[in-house]
Image: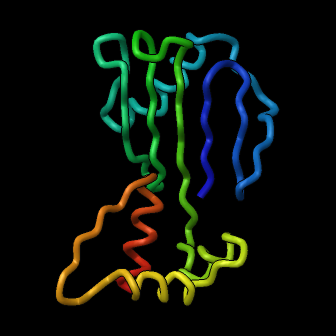
Amino acid sequence: MCQHCLSGPRFPLEQKGQLSRANVAFENDEHVLRILDRIVAPLGRRVDESSPTVDARLPDGSRVNAVIRPIALCGPTITIRKFSKKPLTIDEVFAKIDGVTAEDILRVAGGIIKPERLHMALVGPYGNREKFLQLLRW
């Protein structure tokens, strides 16, 4: 997954976990709003002062979220999350965490989860909760 978060005329790009500065810039907030409209209009969505937020799925499965004034006090903010064509395996997920293996997590989860009674509260970013639930199903 890569995520692009645009807030202001200059913005960073995140690819494969690394941040870099984009080699393009927007002229002003109106330029950002025109681009945003070009992104969401084909999806049947709009964003303006009466509806200052939008959350939509692009045709390729990516997610776009935008907030504009009056909610976004510092100008329009757009986030686009583009997902990998090939989903990560459980081992690949844990390979990204130093020193933790899928077996370690399963051992901890096995000590927590009792088949006769299961109460669990998952907190944190949505994607992390989903990965944990996928691990439990694995």
Relative side of 51 to 102, left or right: left
Q: Say which quadrant the C terminus sits in.
A: bottom left
Percent from the top left, x then y, of residue 131? 45, 69
- Foreground residue among 65 and 127: 127
Relative side of 2 to 54, left or right: right
Which residue is rendered at x = 61% and y = 30% of the image?
6
- Foreground residue among 122 and 85: 122
Which residue is rendered at x = 48% and y = 33% of the image?
39
- Depicted 77 relative to depicted 3: above or below: above
Q: Residue furthest front?
A: 111
Percent from the top left, x then y, of residue 112? 36, 81
Percent from the top left, x then y, of residue 13? 71, 41
Which residue is rendered at x = 35% and y = 83% of the image?
137
Q: Quadrant of residue 45?
A: top left
Q: Residue furthest left?
A: 116
Q: How is the image coloured?
A: rainbow
